[in-house]
């Protein structure tokens, strides 16, 4: 089945997003001594896709990844996973938000020791509910509203506005106008200019994330036998009667809390000393 022109035009706007944001991510990576990976050939991986595997062996294709210690020949430690997406209609925005979450959240769980930044670059029509859902999951959101996309294309005298009644012939004309355009940078730059404050906020969040450092590591070796009660009164009674003398019970587990200068924290619990050490070594 032939690809619809409306779908093809949507891909063009998606391409514009990448044209707009790529140079800024590349510049950011260089400034922070990071490797910037995007779609294309790279000796360190097979194929042209930027693919990462989660803890359950599932592969996820991403648009952009920033790595610490990475190079053309070596995969580094991921410090940022970033996806981009375009949607024209609000009815599709929630599903796309959930799709992005399902691709990136499992990766953050696997690479939690590097606590990577997770971000989305969105354009078109996304409901506030869809945007809030992403933010509640810890995503940095850079959103280019549909109206600003339309205005940006006007910079090159291309009328991109459309709705569900727009015919294929009209999409064909829009596509031809784009393909005839030799320099697409003015459109990309206009899109960024129209959303300057949002772009700055996004990169500020990204900078804060990759430049953060460990402020303290709290280690709690826990001795004693676990006690379980069924109500608050009994819990208070237990604490009142509990002896705080030096414990004679064997070690139960190590509780480790890593605190960052950004107030973020990572908590972990281990029964075995070797596992606790291995966990801490992953941060070296």
Image: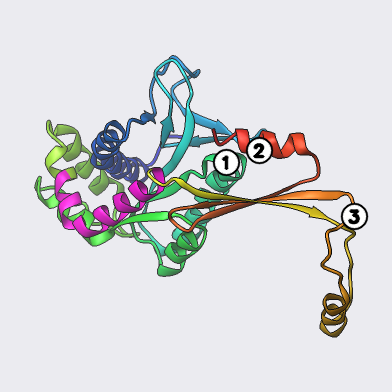
Q: Is residue 277 left or right of residue 226?
A: left
- Give the image location of residue 159, x and y in percent: 16, 52
Using a 10 Å C-alpha cutoff, classify the residue at mark 3 as few (fewer than 14 neighbours), some (14 to 19) or many (20 or more).
few
Residue 143 appears in the rendering: yes
The magenta-colored residue range is 189-210
Residue 263 among those drawn in magenta: no
Q: Position of residue 52 (x, y in %)?
A: 54, 32
- At 48% from the left and 19% from the top, the residue drawn is 47
> Measured along the vertical axis of the image, is residue 185 above or below residue 91?
above
- The relative height of residue 183 versus residue 147 in the rendered view (above or below) is above
Return the residue nearer the eye: 186 or 258. 258
Nearest the viewer among 98 and 172 is 98
- Local packing at callout 2 (Cα closer than 10 Å; few below 14, some 14-19, many 20+) is some
**Image side of residue 167 versus residue 1, left or right:** left
The residue under the point 52% across, 40% down is: 114
- The quarter of the image holding the C terminus is top right
Residue 219 vs residue 85, the one in the foreground: 219
Measured Cα–Cα span from mark 2 to mark 1? 8 Å
Tell whether label 1 touches label 2 (CB within 8 Å): yes
- Secondary structure under the numbered disc 3 in the rendered image: loop
Q: What residue did someone put label 1 on?
A: 113
Q: Which residue is mark 2?
A: 279
Local packing at callout 1 (Cα closer than 10 Å; few below 14, some 14-19, many 20+) is some
Residue 51 position in % (x across, y down) = 51, 30
Q: Is residue 56 visible?
A: no
Q: Is residue 207 magenta-colored?
A: yes
The disc placed on residue 248 is: 3
Q: CA distance from mark 2 to mark 3?
A: 27 Å
Q: From the viewer's perspective, is the residue at label 3 or at label 1 nearer?
A: 3
Residue 174 place in picture, x, y as percent: 21, 44
**Looking at the magenta stretch, what is its main secondary structure?**
helix
């Amino acid at each position: 089945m032939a690809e619809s022109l409306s779908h093809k035009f949507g891909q063009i706007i998606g391409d514009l997003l990448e044209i707009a944001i790529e140079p800024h991510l590349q510049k950011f990576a260089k400034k922070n001594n990071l490797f910037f990976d995007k779609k294309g050939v790279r000796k360190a991986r097979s194929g042209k896709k930027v693919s990462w595997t989660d803890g359950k062996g599932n592969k996820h294709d991403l648009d952009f990844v920033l790595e610490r210690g990475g190079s053309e020949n070596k995969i580094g430690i991921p410090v940022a996973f970033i996806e981009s997406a375009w949607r024209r209609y609000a009815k599709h925005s929630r599903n796309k938000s959930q799709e992005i979450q399902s691709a990136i959240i499992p990766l953050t769980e696997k690479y939690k020791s590097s606590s990577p930044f997770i971000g989305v670059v969105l354009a078109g029509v996304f409901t506030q509910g869809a945007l809030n859902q992403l933010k509640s999951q810890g995503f940095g959101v850079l959103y280019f509203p549909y109206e600003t996309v339309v205005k940006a294309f006007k910079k090159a005298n291309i009328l991109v506005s459309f709705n569900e009644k727009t015919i294929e012939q009209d999409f064909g004309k829009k596509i031809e106008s784009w393909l005839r355009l030799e320099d697409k940078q003015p459109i990309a730059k206009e899109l960024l200019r129209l959303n300057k404050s949002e772009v700055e906020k996004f990169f500020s969040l990204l900078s804060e994330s990759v430049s953060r450092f460990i402020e303290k590591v709290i280690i709690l070796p826990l001795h004693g036998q676990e006690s379980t009660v069924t109500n608050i009164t009994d819990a208070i009674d237990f604490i009142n009667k509990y002896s705080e003398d030096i414990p004679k019970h064997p070690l139960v587990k190590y509780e480790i809390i890593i605190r960052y200068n950004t107030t973020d924290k990572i908590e972990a619990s281990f029964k075995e000393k070797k596992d606790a050490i291995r966990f801490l070594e992953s941060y070296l």
